[in-house]
Image: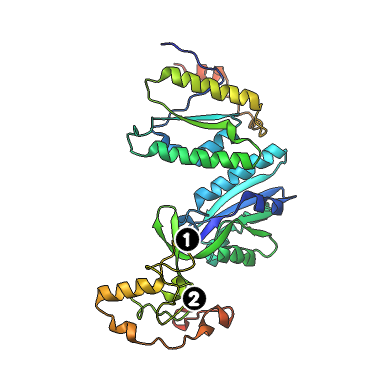
Amino acid sequence: MIVAERKPIEEILPWLEGARSVLVLGCNECVTVCEAGGKKEAGMLAATLRLLFAKEGREVNVGERTLERQCDPEYLDELRDTIDGYDAVVSLACGVGVQFTAERYPSKPVYPGVNTCFMGAALERGVWAERCQGCGQCLLALTGAVCPVARCAKRLLNGPCGGSTAGKCEIGPDVDCAWQLIIDRLKALGRMADYERLIPVKDWSKDRAGGPRKVVREDVRP
Amino acid sequence: MRLGYPESIKIIRVPCTGKVDALHLQRCFERGADGVLVVGCREGDCHYQSGNFRARKRVEEVGRLLERIGIGGARLRMVNLSSSDAPLFVQAAREIHEAVLAAGPSPVGRPRRRPAAPATPEPQAKEALRP
């Protein structure tokens, strides 16, 4: 999932200066699972804003709504009849949802309510860790399903650097050395021969280095 | 024991403090409460293992939020008591009462009253239905 974390209220508040009605817009997908921008978090932010505005004596209508997704136009269309009633939207979706909402309703100011962090997984309730950087050319088949791009601080593709100590990375004692994980996994699978195979120079143009990317599937297009 | 506690306190019963959500706490203040006291079971005595520990984390989180938005974190407290701790409950109730008196009315104020509901049918209409 895309992992995000809630922005501090102090950062959001100045954007709403002068607004007389605000829509807090949650998203039912990734940000719900990582507890940053789902229905509940939208409710909490809306309640916080209502308390703040009431305390300041400002009459601001704070609405809340959570869409199934903010990254698909058909769900965003559900706002078509109501969005004109609001001066501003605080979207709790990832950066994709914020941008897509703004693209769909160009005259409406849309502000982010979360910081979008990474693509990751839940290690336990309340702890999420990065697992993928969307590099556009997956290497996991060669590395025992442990990603050296996302999990090695240097994105090394052919074995660890000298900073690997007792299975940990030199950037911090809590960070696993990705290559230690890869070697452990290949050993467990009896595939250490793969470790000897050199991974060729990676085509980083498929990563962000190649500019904004797009995926097109002609067979499913209307 | 018939111990008295401040009349300003309204009791809301929940099955377990684990059921008390951050949203519930926020809603109390939205609806005009000047303070909220969450009373959970003693630590280690939760029938659902960790309901009171979860509640404490939520109380702390909402308390921090109230502090940051200038309403005052001291208006929200949690204590852990057993059902036989009536004197301690009274003490905790008086303490939150005193804390709220010291802090003054909530800066949020009371919510505006909604427009009056439509008038009930005239009594004679009911009379007319009688055989």
Name the residue at 68% across, 55% down.
Answer: A88
Kindly state the secondary structure of the residue where label 1 is placed: helix
- Mark 1 nearby-residue class (10 Å; few <14, some 14–19, many ≥20): some
Quarter of the image where the N terminus of chain A is located: bottom left
**Chain of the residue where label 2 is placed in the rendered structure:** A
Tell me where residue B20 appears, x and y as whole percent. Answer: 45, 37
Name the residue at 49% across, 75% down.
Answer: A154
Q: Is residue A6 above or below residue B107?
A: below
Q: Along the line of sight, which residue is nearer the eye, A168 or A8?
A: A168
- Mark 2 nearby-residue class (10 Å; few <14, some 14–19, many ≥20): few
Q: Is residue A57 left or right of residue A113?
A: right
Total marks shown come to 2
Asked if marks 1 and 2 touch (Cβ < 8 Å), the reply is no
Residue type (three-letter) at the residue carrying disc 1: Cys
Name the residue at 43% across, 81% down.
Answer: A157
Question: Which residue lies under the disc numbered 1?
Answer: A30
Q: Is residue B27 above or below residue B103?
A: below
Residue depth check, mark 1 versus mark 2: number of the one nearer the observer: 2
Residue at the extreme right of the image, as rendered: A18
Real-space Cα separation, disc 1 to disc 2, in angstroms? 27 Å
Residue B21 in view, yes or no? no
Residue A209 marker: none
Q: Is residue A70 left or right of residue B20?
A: right
Whichever of callouts 1 and 2 sits on the residue coming sooner in the sequence is: 1
Name the residue at 52% across, 31% down.
Answer: B77
Residue A154 marker: 2
Q: Along the line of sight, which residue is nearer the eye, A154 or B107?
A: A154
Residue type (three-letter) at the residue carrying disc 2: Lys
Residue at the extreme left of the image, as rendered: A190
Tell me where residue B129 appears, x and y as whole percent. Answer: 48, 20
Q: Is residue B6 above or below residue A214?
A: above
